[in-house]
Image (cartoon, rainbow, N blue to C red):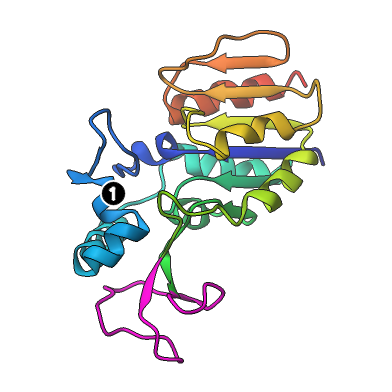
Amino acid sequence: MKQLVVLTGAGMSAESGLKTFRDENGLWEGHDVTKVASPVGFRENPELVLDFYNQRRRQLKETEPNAAHLAIAQLEDSYDVSIITQNVDNLHERAGSTNILHLHGELTKVRSTGNPQDVKDWTEDLFLGDLCERGHQLRPHIVWFGEAVPMIDPAIDICNTAEILLIIGTSLQVYPAASLMHYVPSGIPIFYIDPRPHLESQGNLTVIPKVASEGIEDFKNLLKSI
């Protein structure tokens, strides 16, 4: 089967009701991102940060995968699908996809502030005083602004193997994730689904200016000619 690499961003989950991105005024769910999604914010007011992610975790429990998530999962019947997502939700997993790399961490996991490698599943609220086995405070397993993206090298390795690249629901403005499309083999078909794309179709790039659930159907039809 051909290797299909799928790069997804916030627009992938938007139709499920999740707002997992900054809006134009620099706020995230009404919060200054530096207060709730940065190491400095966590040091200054850890309770605010933990509460912010507790709310996101509760919201996720009430959210279901949308048609686009389900369609990508179904593509595994015909393609070797690898998903690289900027999203911290688990909607790809719940839709049935089996090969997912989370660039920016996972909302349903936490890690030790004393050992970044000490990661555990966590689906309930997280509070000050919740400690790892060595006595360090637990924090959301999220890559905050100003932190390194440890999964970028594995993501590049996946892109190197692509025979088809699908980009869906991302503005391609946030680095280093935005650079990933440049690591796929030269000349392979690239498809970009976004309702407000800043790119135009040219060469091996096909732009589909639709929301995820609509654009994925166009993409599936175009795949038939490859």
Q: Which of these two is toward me, 156 or 108?
A: 156
Quadrant position of residue 136 = bottom left
Quadrant position of residue 201 = top right
Residue 59: x and y, percent?
A: 26, 56
Q: Is residue 210 above or below residue 20?
A: above
What residue do we see at 36% from left, 51% from top? 64
What residue do we see at 50% from left, 45% from top? 86
Residue carrying label 1: 34
The number of callouts visible is: 1
Residue 106: x and y, percent?
A: 45, 60
Q: Is residue 54 visible from the viewing direction of this image?
A: no
Quadrant position of residue 107 = bottom left
Q: Which of these two is toward me, 203 or 26?
A: 26
Q: Is residue 133 above or below residue 83?
A: below
Which element is circle 1 on? helix
Tell me if residue 134 is in the magenta stretch. Answer: yes
Quarter placement of the N terminus: top right
Residue 56: x and y, percent?
A: 28, 57
What residue do we see at 76% from left, 47% from top? 157
Q: Is residue 81 above or below residue 195?
A: below
Residue 25: x and y, percent?
A: 23, 30
Amino acid type at circle 1 is: Thr
What residue do we see at 72% from left, 9% from top? 203
Q: Is residue 143 visible from the viewing direction of this image?
A: yes
Quarter placement of the C terminus: top right
**Magenta highlight range:** 112-140
Q: Which of these two is toward me, 100 or 176?
A: 176
